[in-house]
Image: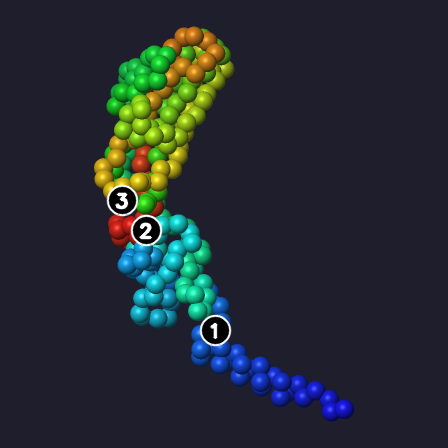
Amino acid sequence: MTGLDTTHVGLVVDELVAAADRLDLRWRLRPATVTTPAASGAAMAVLDGDTVPVKVIPLVGSVVVGDRVMVAIVPPSGHYAIGWVSSPPWATLDSLIISTNGTYYNATAEGLVTSASVTGTLVAGERVRVEARLPISCATSGHVGRFRIRVTNTAGAIVSRRQHTFDSAAGADTSLYGYYDVPSSGTYVFVLTAERAGGATSNVVVTVTSTVGQVVTMALTRHMGAGLARIV
């Protein structure tokens, strides 16, 4: 029996691989830069080393112009963005710092923390992050306060919620954050609310006192690429 000619087999394999490359039949992974939307709702991106954009289906959520993504080339199905080349950037749309001494909330029922709101013009399909930090106190230890970030007013969609139990009447700082998926393009206002959620029956109070460095802060940030346009 004639032995296996490994050299001949190796040449055949090399030729098969080369043919698969010529016919674009092999899965490959390449970095790319997002450019413009596609009519189908996918993205267009330029693969590194190329100049012509190709349609890419993002499997990482919505992307924006300028994002660097890793693209899986899956013939004959197409191109899929399956990860990031680096962490996607975030940019601040609006922020506030309330440092003027005063009481900004003092009640039991859910109500707005006075002057605590951030606003942004948003695009359908994008995800934004809203965060807040505030000084809270109560006349009685054991009080449970509930704090929310909502859209528009006290009846709006809840972006984030946190409950805080006061270990002492002296109070403390608390913080919360959440993500909001924008349903339609427009201007959105995010507000901060507070209420008594249980425990002692005295009011929850949000008080800024500069002597102890207390402030109320809020921030609205969006996932950003090189441009402002969303691709969804």
Q: Is residue 191 left or right of residue 88?
A: left
Q: Which mark is residue 25?
A: 1
Q: CA distance from mark 1 to mark 3?
A: 38 Å
Answer yes or no: do the residues labelled 3 and 2 have beta carbons within 8 Å? yes
Mark 2: few/some/many CA within 10 Å (<14, 14-19, 20+): some
- Location of mark 2 (residue): 232
Query: In the rendered structure, which disc, 1 or 3, sits on the residue that comes first in sequence?
Result: 1
Q: Tell me where residue 154 appears, x and y as whole percent.
A: 31, 23
- Location of mark 3 (residue): 123
Q: How is the image coloured?
A: rainbow
Callout count? 3
Name which residue lies at 42% across and 60% down: 80
Q: Is residue 215 visible?
A: no
Name which residue lies at 45% across and 11% down: 169
Q: Is residue 220 visible?
A: yes
Q: Which secondary structure lies at badge 1?
A: loop
| Residue 118: quadrant of the picture | top left
Mark 3: few/some/many CA within 10 Å (<14, 14-19, 20+): many
Query: In the rendered structure, which disc, 3 or 2, sits on the residue that comes first in sequence?
Result: 3
Q: Which secondary structure lies at badge 2?
A: loop
Name which residue lies at 27% across and 41% down: 184
Q: Tell me where residue 85 appears, x and y as whole percent.
A: 42, 57
